[in-house]
Image (tube, helix red, strand yellow):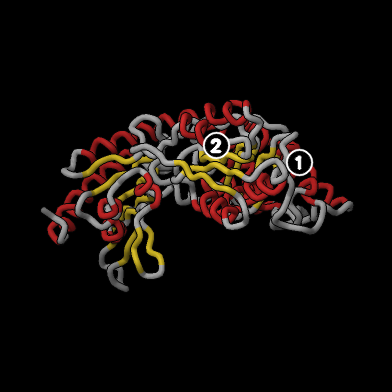
Amino acid sequence: MFILEKTTEQVKEVRVVRSVYFDHSGTTPVHPAVAEEMYRYLIGDSFGNPSSVNHLGLQVRKKVTEARDIAAQAIGAAPGEIVFTSGGTESDNMAIHGAAYTNKSRGNHIITSAVEHHAVLNTVKALGKQGFNITILPVDQYGMVSVDDVAAAITDRTILITIMHANNEVGTIMPIAEIGKLARERKIVFHVDAVQSFGKIPVNVDELGANLLSLSGHKIYGPKGIGVLYIRKGTRWRQTLFHGGAQERLRRAGTENIPGIMGLAKAIELAMENREAESARLMVLRDKLIKGLTSIENVRLTGHPVKRLPNHASFLFKCIEGESMLISLDMKRIAASTGSACTSGSLEPSHVLLAMGIPHADAHGSLRLTLGKDNTDDDVDYLLEVIKPIVEKLRNMSPLED
């Protein structure tokens, strides 16, 4: 992406400034075809309420049914197993709360991992304060949970296992199919957060063994505020978050977000059409980033070196504060992210990196670069060009530099 920058009111000089977006795990821009599809349901006569029995409502209801079919087909599900939600966080909360309280008469033990997204981890921790017994499993140096650890943690009181398909911070792909097999053999409800993996690698609910699975629109060039919760037929689960009308087969009350649903369906169609070719293209750019950045002294890759998302590269820069690096990159119009987050004025390192055994001080120097459909080889070259002097400057300023 390029931006024309005027230097004076008389436009004596026009400078072309490169702008590069490397934060696709944070969010993606809405695809033009998705925006066009959504616009159709914001104007004209496509504004009906699908719960209404008039012709406008029935017309929209038919389109929602088609969108549900598209979402179901993409993950190998049946249309009746698809529930539209407001996004990944709601899907995770619905899945975990619903499974926990529905099965409480059978047991109260829930298993998760230490590197889950906060939408899962904080929900599980909240249930731990409400009488549930929680096991948070450790991960290895790559951020991967062990199938053997999952098996060892299961008791006769275990009612739910919730593990993410791929980690949002370091890109590691978890052994979900093996964990799903364990859960199925023990008749335990298994929830998978597939928000980061869907659209990048295959996501099939039967192959993964998932009873419940979460998706989000804005990670695949769809709109924000829309997601999916897959609920396998026969799974002991009941809706617990909202009470109201009979929408989504009594599983999620509230008038459906029609523009969001239609935009999500279009985004899913595009993702399925282009996934294999696009993933292969992004892997080449990702590997170039990894090779270029790890050639810098005291920079190392985080996450699994092979079992990682095709668009995901994350690093640790020794003796550098990640937020300073982000600001420096942003001044060069490169948008990236870090595992650190500024909370209440104090910088805290990523819980994912700490769980991987990375020292507290080193965890502050994290950088996540996640590629997308508009990124090019030139974008990678530009980052590799500008980041080396940034690293040198920040290390010279660092009190931690040897």
Viewer-proximal residue among 96 and 79: 96
Q: Going by the picture, which residue comes out furthest to the bottom?
A: 9
The local crowd at label 1, few if under 14, some if 14 to 19, many if 20 or more residues have their Cα within 10 Å, is: few
Q: Earlier in the sequence, mark 2 or mark 1?
A: 1
Q: Residue at x 68, y 51 (%)?
A: 40
* Residue 199 in sight: no
Image coords of residue 131 (percent x, y): 62, 54
Q: Residue at x 25, y 35 (%)?
A: 291
Q: Going by the picture, which residue comes out furthest to the front?
A: 156
Location of residue 272 (image quadrant): top right
- The answer to whether residue 300 is left or right of residue 282 is left
Q: Residue at x 68, y 32 (%)?
A: 77
Location of residue 83 (image quadrant): top right
Question: Dot 1: what SS?
Answer: helix
In the picture, the disc for residue 65 is 1
Give the amino acid type for the residue marked by disc 2 in the picture.
Ala
- The answer to whether residue 393 is left or right of residue 314 is left
Image coords of residue 369 (percent x, y): 35, 46
* Residue 98 in sight: yes
In the picture, the disc for residue 295 is none
Image coords of residue 334 (percent x, y): 32, 53
Viewer-proximal residue among 201 and 339: 339
Disc 2 to disc 1, C-alpha distance:
19 Å
Examine the rendered structure and indicate whether residue 173 appears above or below residue 58. Answer: above
- The answer to whether residue 203 is left or right of residue 371 is right
| Residue for badge 2 | 271
